[in-house]
Image (spheres, rainbow, N blue to C red):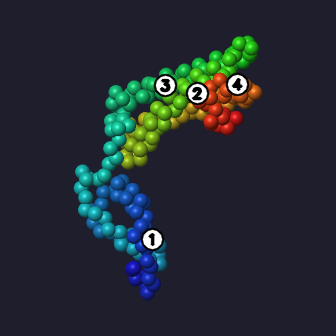
Amino acid sequence: MRENNGSKKDFGEDFSHSLILHRFSLIHLSSVATIFADSDFAFPCYIFLMSTNSIPRWNLDSIFPSLNSPKYKSALADVKSGMENLENFIASAKKLMKDSPDNFDFPIWLKSYLESEDKVARIFTSLGAYAYIIYSVDTMNTEYLNNMAKIDEIGLRVEQIDIDFQQILKANSSKLDDFCSRFPEFAAPRDILE
């Protein structure tokens, strides 16, 4: 408890630990500070003496060692080629639906599309998470910022592909039963497809 202007306030042990720790990781401080939450009271915030070398950092090597690592560059290339593949799937479905709908085997197309989309989504999710994490701890790093712009640009392509995919699903909704019977491994999440 802390007295201030005759009033007593109890803040407990877990008062804004995550906010305080986040601030510690972003700002190097080497003293004890008092932070005033509002004009009625103040609480002591003990800031540990630390050098800039001891600021905690996430170890992201299991995801990607760096933006310049072969692993990261390969994943980025895989996403780009995977996106082109998905765009080709969409284009071929639209063409078959328009030119020869009787020759369009929607269940086979959908299975292939979903398998390809799953691979791309897994890699894209890792790239996006990595980009946002490294940028969040060093917002002044222009290389990280430029990388986020690349990821966001890919995200726009993902959104367009998803819109086109939903249109194809809607146009072929009567064939979903056939799809689920031919490929039962996809039957469980059917409500997602509808």
Residue 121 at what x, y percent from top left? 52, 32
Whether residue 141 is visible here, answered yes or no, is: yes
* Disc nearer the start of the sequence (3/1): 1
Callout 1 touching callout 4 (CB < 8 Å):
no
On the image, which quarter does residue 155 sit in? top right
Mark 2 Cα within 10 Å, few/some/many (few <14, many 20+)? Answer: few
Query: Which mark is nearer the camera, 3 or 2?
Result: 2
- Residue 37, label in figure: 1
Query: Which mark is nearer the camera, 1 or 2?
Result: 2
* Disc nearer the start of the sequence (4/3): 3
Q: Is residue 16 above or below residue 124?
A: below
Look at 25% across and 58% down and name the residue there: 50
Identify the residue position indicated by label 2 in the image.
114
- What type is the residue that disc 2 sits on? Leu
Distance, label 4 to label 3, CA atoms, is 32 Å
- What type is the residue that disc 1 sits on? Ala
